[in-house]
Amino acid sequence: MLNFQFYQRVKMLFGEGSVNQVGELVTEAGYKKPLIVCDPGIVATGLIDKIGKSLEDAGLEYLVYDKVIPDPPYTVVDEGAALCRREGCDCVIACGGGGSIDTAKSINMLRFNEGSVTDYADPSKEMKHSPGLISIPTTSGTGSEVSDGMVISDKDHNKIPMLAINAMSEYAVLDPECMVGMPKKLTIATGLDAFSHAAEGLVTTVANPFTDFFNEQAVRTIREYLPRAAADGKDIEARTKMAICSSVGGWMLGYSHTHAGHSFGHVLGGKFGVPHGIAVMAAEPYVIEFNAPATPERTKRLGELMGAEFTGKETPEEIGAIVRDVLIDFRDNKVGMTSIKEFPYDESRFEEVAKLVSEELFQAFNNRKMEPADALEILKKIYA
């Protein structure tokens, strides 16, 4: 089967104020009654009122489903899908961060596919094409507005990543003004998630020169602009650059993918409730170091993009250590990430967590086989 390396499926409106064109976009797309999916916090910002006015000005009726919560469970998706069907909504507008977009993505998918969203965790189960999703991100991190995946939590609070090529956004509206109100801690956590997509994408088993072109630029840009966005949330240039990098990173998830850094992110998020960007970046330096013997030149390139210096005589292990340290410095000192140890954790569960990490989906793209003992060693470093 042919494996096409490059294709962008999502039509995008980009720029300051573009959110005001949502009503025109829905009309032009031929839809009549959107369901807006968001969390209560987004409603409180007034952004839903702005979107609603645009829809009303276009003569459109709409409904708001504002029950999204962090690490959204399947029950929220199934409830929203039932509402969408009952009210006859013919498209879904996602507004918020990755959780809101993944929830909306799942709700829209269930307009065309029977059962519960968790049924589609089985990759062998057919997922029919599901048009009608319009995504408006308010954070710069997941890139879910253009990615081909979604992550929903099951009844045991496990994060379940699902391949959702047939449930991707049909349209995305990328408006930097929607991100100006992000609190500093959220700016940092989501920005580091975007960084991890690009950084991991440079050192996966499927990285290639085409994806490198985008991932390298994203790493360079985030290195420069994330500290600025964290320092001044009203810096519209920094917000714009981070919005672009977030979408580029989400786009590349379908091509260069991510690796064991995201395995840690998904498991630690599900088991200990750690925000995704923090969970991933707490592990990232050590995962990059672990993988360095299997991919030294690409690891070195990542380090160079982050400002690390090399003599050319380093062993693969030494390259890994240098890049580990420069990533920790960027994460903790340049950006100021909240320590993962500020979130409750249980050391007695570390072996359970390590086993789950070693078995997680994105290990498939790791350049070096990670056994439970390897994951446990990294886990101990994370919480040292």
Image (tube, grey):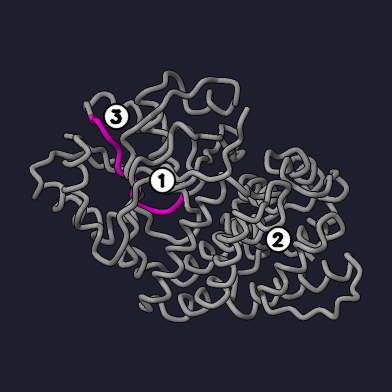
At x 64%, y 57%, the residue is 279
Is-magenta flag for residue 333? no
- Reading the chain from its start, which is encountered first: label 2 or label 3? 3
Give the side of residue 155 with respect to residue 236, left or right: right
- Range of residues picked out in magenta: 89-100
At x 74%, y 44%, the residue is 357
- Reading the chain from its start, which is encountered first: label 1 or label 3? 3
Gap between marks 1 and 2 measured at Cα: 24 Å
Q: Position of residue 129 (x, y in %)?
A: 41, 27
Name the residue beneath numbered marker 2.
Answer: 284
Name the residue beneath numbered marker 1.
Answer: 101
Q: Is mark 2 on a helix, strand or loop?
A: helix
Residue 54 can be seen in this image = yes
Q: Where is residue 280 in the image (x, y as percent from the top left)?
A: 64, 57
Which quarter of the figure has residue 9?
Answer: top left
Residue 382 can be seen in this image = no
